[in-house]
């Protein structure tokens, strides 16, 4: 008998995956591909949407023929801030513009000035000023800078909904994609922002549906429930929201360290927006307060300096064991010139205007001493970012996923900054894909528990009294 499964397309900028999960959400089949970029009509690098589309169609056709599996449901997780614009024949009318593409000078100001000013506009839409990363501004740019191309657009679909469209043929506007720094949604009124109607942008946007929505498609004399897709950041939060009822925060670590607090309902302030905070809408339609800091890039930049100066291997930092005595010595002195000031975070994170000269590494007697100081200072910045979304009622737990989980020094110092909160590192492979599967859970797989999916390890905070008063940041 064919094994019942749910098929998930997990579309990242680098890797595209097709994963099949059984009823216990174990992966029983995997297909993965990396595709070269192309360039858009301006010569800027972008994803080749045609090649990705061909792979999705081809791989779905192949898996339907595989007699080992019975595909009961399907869903898509994909990165955000990306629109596929369709013409009246249902084909892409434009390139898939890269969200890193520079935004024209003065165009965002024009929009902001028309609709209440930058402070009011960004606060209402919970969308920091991010240029093409505000996907709604991509539509505004097309309308005003490429009007002939804009006139060919029939429907504009965020990337998760576009790949769902390839499977079930229907156009939808799903709430987690719409509610992620798009500048399209008015959080204060829970509807599209006035500018969307005034600029007639709404004519290209399909109806808004919930993340649980699905279409029925025929598949080998049976039916498959096909979801409408979900934004990958929101998808990665789904397993935690389903598994834990008490309040928590999730720190997703990597190049960007993003703190998500699904239990903070306080409205965003303009000051928080300036410090790289924003709000998402989760799969339940509830806002999630989030803060970002470019921690991974900063760590790698500074670590490379240490590696060169002390003539160590590129992975030497992985062998560092937290040294309490060394930390106490570093905390006991007044050595402001030793601090590691951010060098790669300008205009981002909780300290957008905080700068300082690169640290003189000759002041340190060893790599170990310099690295401990580096992590002290990075953790200070991370704690500031987390406190921005902690709320007046702090959560009971913080779960941490991603690359920094392996850094014991970082974990122990961060936990020490929040003595009343329990910190846990967690291993949850393919969290975005799993989240996309779980929002379809009640439609195809009732009764199965997901508790077995989580593996936690509690972080023991560094017990150093001076840490509670340590701060090198002058706010």
Image: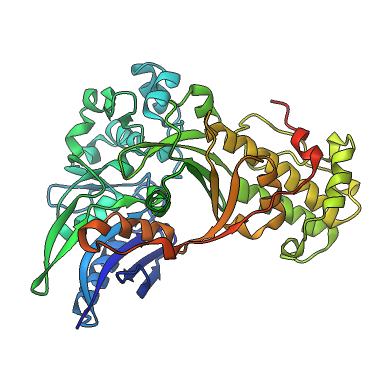
Residue in the foreground of this view, choosing between 7 and 417: 417
Residue in the foreground of this view, choosing between 12 and 97: 12
Q: Give percent across and percent down for residue 346.
A: 62, 36
Q: Give percent across and percent down for residue 311.
A: 83, 63
Tell me if residue 156 can be seen.
yes
Residue that lies at the very extreme toward the left in this rendered image: 221
Q: Quadrant of the N terminus?
A: bottom left
Residue in the foreground of this view, choosing between 243 and 363: 243
Q: Is residue 81 rendered to the left or right of residue 64?
A: right
At a point 45% along the width and 26% down the height, the residue shown is: 268
Q: Give percent across and percent down for residue 467.
A: 77, 39
Q: Give percent across and percent down for residue 296.
A: 61, 51
Q: Is residue 47 rendered to the left or right of residue 68?
A: right
In this figure, which colouring scheme has been used for the structure? rainbow
Tell me if residue 257 can be seen.
no
Number of numbered discs overlaid on the protein picture: 0
Q: Quadrant of the C terminus?
A: top right
Q: Is residue 437 rendered to the left or right of residue 170?
A: right
Residue 167 vertical position relative to residue 293 in the rendered view, above or below:
below
Residue in the foreground of this view, choosing between 276 and 143: 276
Q: Is residue 310 rendered to the left or right of residue 261?
A: right
């Amino acid at each position: 008998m064919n094994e019942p499964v749910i098929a998930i397309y997990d579309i990242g900028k680098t890797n595209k995956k097709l994963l099949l999960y059984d009823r216990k959400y174990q992966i029983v089949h995997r297909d993965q591909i990396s595709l070269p970029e192309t360039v858009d009509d301006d010569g800027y690098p972008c994803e080749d949407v045609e090649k990705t589309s061909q792979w999705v169609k081809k791989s779905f056709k192949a898996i339907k023929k595989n007699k080992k599996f019975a595909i009961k449901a399907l869903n898509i997780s994909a990165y955000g801030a990306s629109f596929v614009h369709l013409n009246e024949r249902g084909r892409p009318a434009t390139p898939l513009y890269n969200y890193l593409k520079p935004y024209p000078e003065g165009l965002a100001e024009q929009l902001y000035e028309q609709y209440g000013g930058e402070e009011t506009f960004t606060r209402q839409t919970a969308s920091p000023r991010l240029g093409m990363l505000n996907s709604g501004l991509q539509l505004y740019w097309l309308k005003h800078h490429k009007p002939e191309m804009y006139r060919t657009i029939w429907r504009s679909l965020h990337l998760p909904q576009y790949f769902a469209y390839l499977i079930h043929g229907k156009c939808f506007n799903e709430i987690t994609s719409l509610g992620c720094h798009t500048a399209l949604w008015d959080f204060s009124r829970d509807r599209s922002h006035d500018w969307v109607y005034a600029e007639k942008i709404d004519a290209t946007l399909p109806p808004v549906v919930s993340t649980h929505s699905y279409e029925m498609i025929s598949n080998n004399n049976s039916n498959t429930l096909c979801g409408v897709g979900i934004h990958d950041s929101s998808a990665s939060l789904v397993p935690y929201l389903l598994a834990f009822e008490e309040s928590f925060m999730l720190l997703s670590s990597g190049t960007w360290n993003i703190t998500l607090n699904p239990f903070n309902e306080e409205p965003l302030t303009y000051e928080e927006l300036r410090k790289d905070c924003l709000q998402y809408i989760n799969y339940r339609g509830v806002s999630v307060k989030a803060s970002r800091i470019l921690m991974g890039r900063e760590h790698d930049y500074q670590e490379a300096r240490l590696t060169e100066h002390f003539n160590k291997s590129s992975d030497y930092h992985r062998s560092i064991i937290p040294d309490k005595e060394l930390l106490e010595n570093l905390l006991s002195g007044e050595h402001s010139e030793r601090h590691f000031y951010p060098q790669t975070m300008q205009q981002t994170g909780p300290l957008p205007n905080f700068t300082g000269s690169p640290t003189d590494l000759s002041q340190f007697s060893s790599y170990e001493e310099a690295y401990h100081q580096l992590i002290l200072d990075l953790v200070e910045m991370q704690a500031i970012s987390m406190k921005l979304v902690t709320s007046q009622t702090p959560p009971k737990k913080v779960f941490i996923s991603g690359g920094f989980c392996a850094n014991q020094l970082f974990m122990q110092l961060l936990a020490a900054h929040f003595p009343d909160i329990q910190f846990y590192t967690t291993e949850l492979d393919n969290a975005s894909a799993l989240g996309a599967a779980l929002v379809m859970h009640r439609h195809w797989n009732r009764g199965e528990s997901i508790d077995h999916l989580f593996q936690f390890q509690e972080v023991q905070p560094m017990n150093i009294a001076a840490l509670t008063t340590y701060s090198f940041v002058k706010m």
